[in-house]
Amino acid sequence: MFEAVPTLLETLLLGRSIERRATLARRVPRWLVDRIQDSEFQQTVRLVGERSPFYRQRFAELGIDPRLVRRPEDLGEFYTTSADLRARDTEDFVCGKPEAGFETTGTTAKNKRVYFSNEEVRDIGFEGAVGLWNLGLRPDDRVVDAFDYAFWNAGITLMHSLNAMGCFHVIASKLPPADFYERVRDYRFNVMIVDTAWLVTLTEIARERGTWPIKFILSGSENMTEQTRAWIESVWQTRVYQAYGQTESLGATGIECPAQKGYHLNEFNFKFEILNPNAEGFGELVFTTLTRKVMPFVRYRSNDITRILDEPCGCALRSMRRIDKIVGRGDEIVSCGMGMISPWIFEKWLAGVSGLADDWQVAVVQPGPRDVIEVRLELDEAGGQTPQSAEAALLRHLEEIFPYYYKNFRMGMYDVQFKFLPRGTLRPAGPRRKLRRVVDERIPVAALHS
């Protein structure tokens, strides 16, 4: 019975009206959302069990009959992981004809590829428009989009959201902030949708040269500290909101509402779980796609640590549950102004410069509004390097092997500081103690532990 409910709601009640969809989100009872999710979850499990070589093989190995699965817990300890996407051919996950593809960037030596149909991209864009409507976007607004479009999904998804809204918009892409500032003022844009770290540099420029009237700013791609948000809001005299997503979710996991207290989840397209929550409810966010037919995911481990927020919200999306801000990663992958970084990046970068000792550590710190990549190194006394020569060589090598990260550096999206320490300083005391290579020191970690 409930398999037909989403289609009936779409056809008879909603059409393609963003305003009506927002009204539905305000009024739909929670029990109905849960019933629709359960029905679509079952359909997704059966679909991948029939058409995906990866899921068909893994279900057989674990003795899982997709026809008997009703809820996520029926799958036991089965999850889909980023390691699965890297280890297997992308086609092993495909269940239908791909028409659009995107890549993750920076997390591993091999980027993950995710495929969609054009209809799936349009539909996710339409859902995103509902979140923008809730923030106050209307058809008579003028929007500038400063997302990077190279293999990344965020800009394409946003373009479909703005097309659905019908407002004037320009794709500026990821211009250097100084160039962007000079080119956009005459357009009278009153909404900016931008990369988080890039926004910091633009705001520094605007603080010196002047701002213009802005209705709101929406940022994505990484976390923003509340101190940075408050500073940006004070410069632009407007509200700054954040969206949350991954390439695997087509960038459409959740979005803030005017309360700025967590992300409302896209529960018409995903079913969410919190894996192994601690006493405070923090655990890894896991999601299953509910409406995708080309490359669905079942119980995909996002690697992001968060929790479900129970306190009620009075906005139009109140029937959609909220998660807290992301407080960390399940491994040493960190999202920051440099991009998505992990140990392999620095292993490759540092290996190209002679005179460095084996021990090193990279910390993301934030003494001000901009992220700082603090590279902690020990010199090999026999290597002939001085701190000054090593620093110059490292910056040259970064530009040679990682132009994407170097471009972000030159744009001012993050700073790099090198800290040279005496030999033996970095390695923790005690037998067989592991040196953690990449650490995020911008956020408190106490919340991660029960």
Image (cartoon, grey):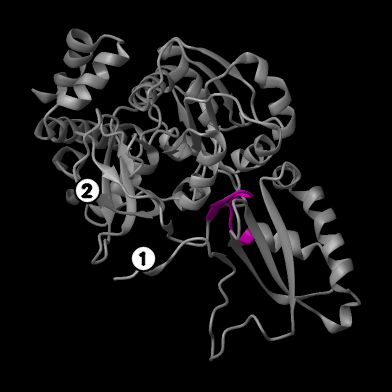
In the rendered image of this protein, does residue 341 appear above or below residue 354? above
Q: Which label was assigned to residue 448?
A: 1
Q: Residue drawn 18% across and 16% down?
A: 9
- The residues bearing labels 2 and 1 have C-alpha atoms spaced at a distance of 32 Å
33, 189: nearer the viewer: 189
Residue at image position (56%, 89%) is 429
Above or below for 317 versus 402: above
Horizontal and vertical percent position of residue 377:
72, 73
Query: Can residue 405 be seen from the camera position used here?
Result: yes
Q: Is residue 346 above or below residue 119?
A: below
User: Label 2 belongs to which residue?
Assistant: 64
Task: Inspect the image, locate mark 1, and give the three-letter code of the amino acid beneath it.
Answer: Leu
**What amino acid is at disc 2?**
Ile
Q: Position of residue 437 (x, y in %)?
A: 59, 69
Residue 391: give its label: none
**Residue 381 placed where, x, y %?**
85, 83
Instruction: Report whether residue 56 is seen.
Output: no
